[in-house]
Image: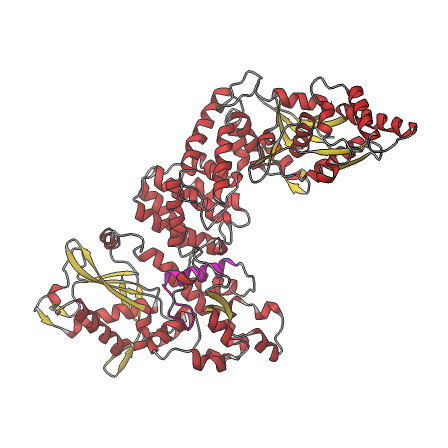
C-alpha cells in the first residue's frame, strides 16, 4: 500500500467552532456569499441531532509557522494552520448558527439564519412567522449556545411558555427536557477531518483536487488559490468579488465593471491576473508560487511568498483597472461581437484579456494598433475554439512564447504568426464549412458569421436597417427588432417530409430578418415570398445575396443542396469579415492617417499594392489605357484570391504621389471613372465586393480601393478576350485556361 498523503484527525463541533473563531482554521466563507439554503442548514442540524454522519472535512496543513507574516490588512488573531479544502459550507453553517453570526447572501446583504426546534416532536424547521407564534417551538436554537447560557434555566422558562398554551403530561415534560439537553450537546458531535500534509507535492495536491467531490461539484484548483488569498491577502479577494458583483449591475453614472459581454467570477479574473503576473495558465504551478515555493530547489520561503504576492497584487491592479477593462471590451466590439450571446466561450474572452493587458502595460503598444490586433486574435480564438476544451494547456503554450519577449513588435509578430498558422486556406475552405453543418444554437462558427455581418456593415435580409443596430444589446423591447428566420420555413419543410429538428434548424437555414417580415413570410416557400420581398434596387440585391450568403436561384434549390452551397458562401463571408480586422482601419479610430501609414509602411504584399496613378503615364504625362489596365488587373487578382487593398497615389517605394497628377476635377469624378472601368471590364455585380474611399497620406490625398473575396470567378474583359488573374505574392499573375480551371476547382 502506498504511503498516504493525509492523516485522520477527530474533532468535535465545539473544537472546530473555537478554532475558526481564533483563526487556527481559515474559514473565508464566513465573510463570503453563503450559497446553502436555510433548509439545508436545518437538515444538517437534524442529521447531527439524530446521530447521522454528515461527511468528512478536508484540510491542508499550512506550510508556514503561526508567526508567518499575513499579507494585506485583516484582524486575524493568527495565520491559519489549517486551510479548508472541502467542507466550507458545512463549517459556515455550524459557525453561523452556533455563534449566532449573520451570513452574506448572493445579493451581499447580511442575514441571520434562524433554525427552530420542536422538542416534543423532535422536529427542526426554518423559522417563519407561523412558528414565531407557536410556543411549542424554540424559535432560534442559537440561544442554546450563547455566552453564559444555562440550559436548565432555559428549559424551565420554555416549559412555562408551553403550559400557557396547553397542558402537558409528565411524560411530555420529560421528553422536552431530554430533547433540549440532547440538542445542546451537539457541541460534542464528532466530526472527522482528513488533513493533507504540508509536505505534499503540488502534483499530488492537484490530483487530490480533481478527484474530490463536494455536493456533486468537482473542486477546482482556483478554489484553493482563492482560499490562500483569503488567508494572506483578503483585501485582494474582496476586490475581485466587488468587481464581479458590479459587473452584473447596470451603472447609474458611477464608473463600474458592468458590460454586455460577461459577468465574470473571482476565479476567472484570478486566472487573468495569474497569466499576466507569471505567464502561467496551469494553476497547479500558482499555488506553489503563492505558498512561497522555489520551483527549482523545492524549498519554501516566507520572503519569497511575500514577493510573489506583491507581483500578483500589481497584476490584479491592472486586471481590475476600469479603463483597461472597458477599452478591452471595445476590442471585442471591434471584432464584430455585439453581446455575450455571441460569446461561445468565456475562456476565449478572458484569456484574450491577458494578451491585451500585456500589450497595453508591458509592451506599451499604441492603443489603436493594439485594439486591432487583439480584435483579430479574439475573432480567431473564438472561431477556432482555441481555449475551449483543454484551455489551460493551450494558454500555457501560448504564454510560454512570451516569457522572454521584451519588444512590442515581436509581441505583435508572434500573435500575427499564430493567427496565420490557424487561419489557413484549408480552414476557410474545408474546416469552417464542415463546422457550419450543425443545428447548435450556440456555435463558434455561427457567432463568427454574426460578427462578420457586423464588420461588413450588413443589412438585415430585405431591410435597409443594419444588423448591428437591430441587434445592439443597448436596445431591447418585447419583440426583437430582428429575428433569426428560417429561409426554408419549418412548416414548409414538413410538407416535404423534413421534420427532424437537426435538419430544419441547421445554421445554414437561418438568417436575420426584421420582425414584421418574419410574420409576413409565415410558412411560405422561398419561391413564394422572395418575389414580393426582394428590393427593386439591383445593387442592394447583389449586396443582400452576398451578405446573407444566398446562392443564385437558391429559392428553387433542393434543401440539402441549398445547405451545402450556403455553408461555403457563409465561410467566405466570415473570411471577408476576418480580413477586415487585418486590413481595415478601425471605425472607432479617428486617427485614419496613422492607420493608413501603418499599412503602407508594411510594403507591398499579396494583399497590398501601390499604384502611382489611375490613368496618367508619368513618363509622358498623358492619359494611358495601360495604367488603367494595370489597376483593373490588380483588382481582379485581389477578388480572385484573398482580397486586398490597392492604394492609388503612392509610388512603389511607399512615397506619396497624390491623386492630383491624374487631373480629375474632384474625388467624385475620379471615383466614377474607376467604377465605370470596373463595371465595363469586371462586371457590375463585382462592385459589391469593392469599397472605394480617399484618405490623407503624408499631406497628400490618395485613393484607397478595398477588395473583398469574390464568391465566384472574376474575368477581366480585354477586347474580345476574357483573362483570369490571381495574386501570387506581391504581384498579379495571369493564369492559362488550363491552370485557371484547376485553380477555380480548388478556390470556388
In the rendered image, the vertical position of residue 534 relative to residue 571, given as above or below: below
Q: Residue at x 31, y 45 (%)?
A: 367
Q: Nearer the viewer, residue 274 or 394?
A: 274
Q: Say whether residue 651 is left or right of residue 180.
A: left
In the rendered image, the vertical position of residue 560 relative to residue 572, given as above or below: below
Q: Residue at x 45, y 24 (%)?
A: 307
In the rendered image, the vertical position of residue 459 relative to residue 374, given as above or below: below
Q: Quadrant of residue 691?
A: bottom left
Place of residue 86 in the rendered image (x, y in percent of width and height, measured from the top left): 66, 33
Q: Quadrant of residue 625?
A: bottom left
Magenta span has 444? yes
Q: Say whether residue 67 is left or right of residue 676.
A: right
Q: Residue furthest bottom?
A: 720
Q: Say whether residue 736 is left or right of residue 284.
A: left
Q: Residue furthest top?
A: 67
Q: How is the image coloured?
A: secondary structure
Q: Which quarter of the rendering shows the N terminus?
A: top right
Place of residue 285 in the rendered image (x, y in percent of width and height, measured from the top left): 52, 33
Q: Which quarter of the rendering shows the C terminus?
A: bottom left
Q: Nearer the viewer, residue 264 or 272?
A: 264
Residue 743: tell me if it is visible: no
Q: Residue furthest front?
A: 164
Place of residue 103 in the rendered image (x, y in percent of width and height, measured from the top left): 61, 32
Magenta stretch: give its range.
Answer: 443-464
Place of residue 249 in the rendered image (x, y in percent of width and height, measured from the top left): 48, 45
Q: What is the count of numbered marks?
A: 0
Magenta span has 203? no
Residue 677: tell me if it is visible: yes
Q: Residue at x 44, y 82 (%)?
A: 531
In the rendered image, the vertical position of residue 192 relative to residue 428, given as above or below: above
Q: Quadrant of residue 21?
A: top right
Q: Say whether residue 709 is left or right of residue 718.
A: right
Amino acid at each position: 500500500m502506498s504511503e498516504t498523503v493525509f492523516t485522520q484527525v477527530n474533532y468535535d463541533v465545539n473544537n472546530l467552532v473555537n478554532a475558526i473563531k481564533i483563526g487556527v482554521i481559515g474559514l473565508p466563507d464566513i465573510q463570503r456569499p453563503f450559497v446553502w439554503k436555510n433548509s439545508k442548514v436545518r437538515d444538517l442540524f437534524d442529521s447531527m441531532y439524530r446521530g447521522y454522519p454528515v461527511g468528512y472535512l478536508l484540510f491542508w496543513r499550512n506550510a508556514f509557522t503561526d508567526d508567518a507574516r499575513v499579507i494585506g490588512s485583516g484582524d486575524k488573531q493568527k495565520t491559519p494552520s489549517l486551510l479548508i479544502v472541502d467542507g466550507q459550507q458545512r463549517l459556515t453553517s455550524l459557525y453561523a448558527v452556533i455563534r449566532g453570526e449573520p451570513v452574506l447572501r448572493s445579493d451581499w446583504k447580511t442575514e441571520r439564519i434562524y433554525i427552530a426546534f420542536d422538542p416534543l416532536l423532535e422536529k427542526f424547521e426554518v423559522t417563519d412567522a407561523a412558528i414565531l407564534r407557536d410556543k411549542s417551538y424554540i424559535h432560534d436554537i442559537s440561544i442554546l449556545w450563547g455566552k453564559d447560557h444555562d440550559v436548565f434555566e432555559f428549559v424551565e422558562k420554555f416549559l412555562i411558555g408551553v403550559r400557557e398554551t396547553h397542558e402537558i403530561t409528565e411524560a411530555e415534560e420529560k421528553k422536552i427536557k431530554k430533547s433540549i439537553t440532547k440538542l445542546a450537546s451537539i457541541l460534542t458531535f464528532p466530526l472527522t477531518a482528513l488533513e493533507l500534509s504540508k509536505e505534499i507535492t503540488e502534483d499530488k495536491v492537484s490530483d487530490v483536487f480533481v478527484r474530490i467531490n463536494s455536493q456533486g461539484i468537482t473542486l477546482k484548483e482556483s478554489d484553493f488559490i482563492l482560499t490562500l488569498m483569503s488567508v494572506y491577502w483578503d483585501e485582494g479577494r474582496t476586490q475581485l468579488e466587488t468587481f464581479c458583483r458590479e459587473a452584473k449591475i447596470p451603472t447609474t453614472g458611477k464608473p463600474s465593471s458592468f458590460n454586455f459581454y460577461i459577468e465574470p467570477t473571482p476565479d476567472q479574473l484570478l486566472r487573468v491576473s495569474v497569466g499576466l503576473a507569471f505567464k502561467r495558465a496551469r494553476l497547479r504551478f500558482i499555488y506553489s508560487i503563492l505558498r512561497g515555493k522555489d520551483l527549482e530547489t523545492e524549498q519554501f520561503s516566507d520572503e519569497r511568498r511575500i514577493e510573489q504576492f506583491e507581483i500578483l497584487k500589481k497584476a490584479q491592479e491592472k486586471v481590475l483597472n476600469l479603463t483597461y477593462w472597458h477599452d478591452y471590451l471595445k476590442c471585442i466590439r471591434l471584432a464584430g461581437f455585439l453581446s455575450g450571446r455571441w460569446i461561445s466561450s468565456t475562456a476565449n474572452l478572458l484569456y484574450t484579456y491577458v494578451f491585451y493587458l500585456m500589450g497595453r502595460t508591458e509592451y506599451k503598444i499604441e492603443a489603436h494598433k493594439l485594439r486591432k490586433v487583439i480584435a483579430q486574435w479574439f475573432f480567431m480564438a473564438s472561431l477556432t475554439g482555441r481555449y475551449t476544451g483543454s484551455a489551460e494547456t493551450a494558454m500555457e503554450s501560448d504564454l510560454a512564447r512570451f516569457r522572454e519577449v521584451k519588444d512590442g513588435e515581436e509581441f505583435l509578430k508572434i500573435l500575427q504568426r499564430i493567427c496565420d498558422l490557424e487561419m489557413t486556406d484549408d480552414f476557410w475552405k474545408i474546416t469552417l464549412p464542415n463546422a457550419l453543418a450543425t443545428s447548435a444554437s450556440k456555435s463558434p462558427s455561427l457567432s463568427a458569421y454574426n460578427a462578420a455581418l457586423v464588420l461588413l456593415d450588413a443589412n438585415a435580409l430585405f431591410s435597409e436597417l443594419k444588423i448591428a443596430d437591430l441587434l445592439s444589446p443597448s436596445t431591447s423591447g418585447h419583440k426583437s427588432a430582428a429575428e433569426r428566420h428560417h429561409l426554408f420555413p419549418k412548416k414548409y419543410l414538413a410538407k416535404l417530409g423534413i421534420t427532424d429538428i437537426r435538419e430544419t434548424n441547421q445554421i445554414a437555414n437561418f438568417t436575420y430578418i426584421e420582425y414584421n417580415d418574419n410574420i409576413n413570410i409565415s410558412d411560405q416557400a422561398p419561391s413564394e415570398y422572395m418575389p414580393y420581398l426582394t428590393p427593386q434596387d439591383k445593387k442592394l440585391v447583389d449586396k443582400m445575396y452576398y451578405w446573407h450568403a444566398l446562392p443564385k436561384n437558391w429559392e428553387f434549390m433542393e434543401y440539402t443542396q441549398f445547405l451545402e452551397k450556403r455553408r461555403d458562401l457563409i465561410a467566405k463571408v466570415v473570411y471577408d469579415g476576418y480580413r477586415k480586422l487585418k486590413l481595415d482601419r478601425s471605425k472607432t479610430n479617428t486617427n485614419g492617417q496613422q492607420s493608413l501609414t501603418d499599412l503602407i509602411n508594411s510594403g507591398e504584399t499579396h494583399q497590398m499594392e501601390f499604384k502611382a496613378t489611375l490613368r496618367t503615364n508619368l513618363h509622358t504625362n498623358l492619359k494611358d489605357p495601360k495604367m488603367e489596365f494595370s489597376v483593373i488587373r490588380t483588382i481582379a487578382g485581389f477578388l480572385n484570391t484573398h482580397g486586398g487593398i490597392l492604394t492609388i497615389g503612392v509610388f512603389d517605394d511607399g512615397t506619396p504621389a497624390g491623386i492630383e497628377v491624374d487631373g480629375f476635377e474632384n474625388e467624385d469624378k475620379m471615383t466614377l471613372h474607376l467604377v465605370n472601368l470596373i463595371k465595363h471590364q469586371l462586371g457590375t455585380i463585382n462592385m459589391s465586393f469593392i469599397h472605394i474611399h480617399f484618405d490623407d497620406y503624408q499631406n497628400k490625398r490618395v485613393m484607397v480601393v478595398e477588395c473583398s473575396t469574390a464568391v465566384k470567378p472574376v474575368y477581366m474583359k480585354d477586347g474580345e478576350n476574357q483573362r483570369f488573374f490571381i495574386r501570387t505574392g506581391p504581384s498579379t499573375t495571369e493564369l492559362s485556361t488550363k491552370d485557371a480551371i484547376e485553380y477555380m476547382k480548388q478556390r470556388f
